[in-house]
Amino acid sequence: MTVSFVGAGPGAPDLLTLRGRIRLRRADVVLHAGSLVPPAVVALARRARRVVDTASLTLDEIVAEMVRAHRAGLEVVRLHSGDPSLYGAIAEQIRRLDAHGIPWEIVPGVPAFAAAAAALGRELTLPGVAQSVVLTRMPGRASPMPPGEDLAAFAATGATLVLHLAVNHLARIVRILTPVLGADAPVAVVHRASWPDQRILRGTLADIRAKVKAAGITRTALIVVGRVLAAEDFPDSRLYHPDHHHVLRPRKGRR
């Protein structure tokens, strides 16, 4: 039997991929973080014999659940919020499954930053404004940042910044980014993107901290920083310009 690491998406059940839904429907055992994966997604595992909220478990306890289920011939789904490849801590679980000789697969999910961009109604890359997106976080007790991964350096590139697991570090983020981007740099905080209680706060580096504090948002939020959030007078992409030719739209008169 196989352990499936399934991306649960940002929260809304209809943003779960078709493959993820299929894996859930055939699962015998489901392991999920209750605070991050909504009950409506977990409820799709209708035939599951065992559903475990892993919020209070250690890594070894989580893996032990997988090993027991595998030895009993049961299909296991490990539900991760968003996409498992981003801050999913799946690599360490996979390493242990490999040591036990247990097969596994990864089922991608809609990442939270994509749901946040949709909620904001903004494209994160705009011609002449930003053509890169940096997905990052702030150092914390769980994981320090490796040398060279510096927020100010990322900001200096002009890329759109998306910070995960960072809303409690907002004061520090403002202090780091303001000298680089300016106090008027646009910022958006999306709390529980795609959930029924989703909230969006918009502002600048000068005022976003006060707005977040007033709203009482302390977790489960993404911070987006960049000129793309307010840009309106940007050039159209050359991709669809009549003078732009390529193999599927050759210059007239040529084959």
Image: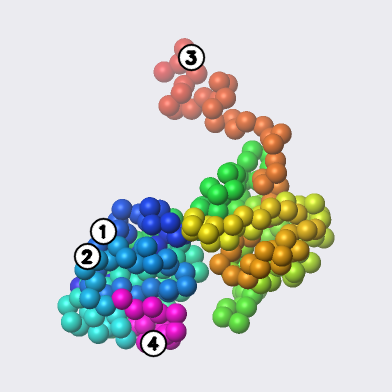
Q: Quadrant of the N terminus?
A: bottom left
At 40% from the left and 79% from the top, the residue drawn is: 54
Q: Residue 252, labelled with which disc?
A: 3
Q: Amino acid at mark 4?
A: Asp
Residue 91 is inside the magenta segment: no
Boundaries of the magenta span:
51-63
* Residue 227 image offset from top left, x and y in percent: 71, 47
Gap between marks 4 and 1, in whole Å? Answer: 27 Å
- Whether tag 2 and tag 4 are in contact, CB under 8 A, the answer is no
| Along the line of sight, the residue nearer the viewer: 89 or 7 | 7
Q: Amino acid at mark 2?
A: Arg
Q: Amino acid at mark 1?
A: Ile
| Along the line of sight, the residue nearer the viewer: 69 or 54 | 54
Q: Quadrant of the C terminus?
A: top left
Which element type, helix, strand or loop, lies under badge 3?
A: loop
Label 4 vs 1, first from the N-terminus: 1
Residue 197 is left or right of residue 150, and the answer is left
Gap between marks 3 and 1, in whole Å? Answer: 47 Å
| Residue at the spot of label 2 | 26
| Along the line of sight, the residue nearer the viewer: 196 or 113 | 196
| Residue 135 visible in the shown view | no
At 45% from the left and 60% from the top, the residue drawn is: 11
At 73% from the left and 53% from the top, the residue drawn is: 203
| Residue at the spot of label 1 | 22
- Whether tag 4 and tag 3 are in contact, CB under 8 A, the answer is no
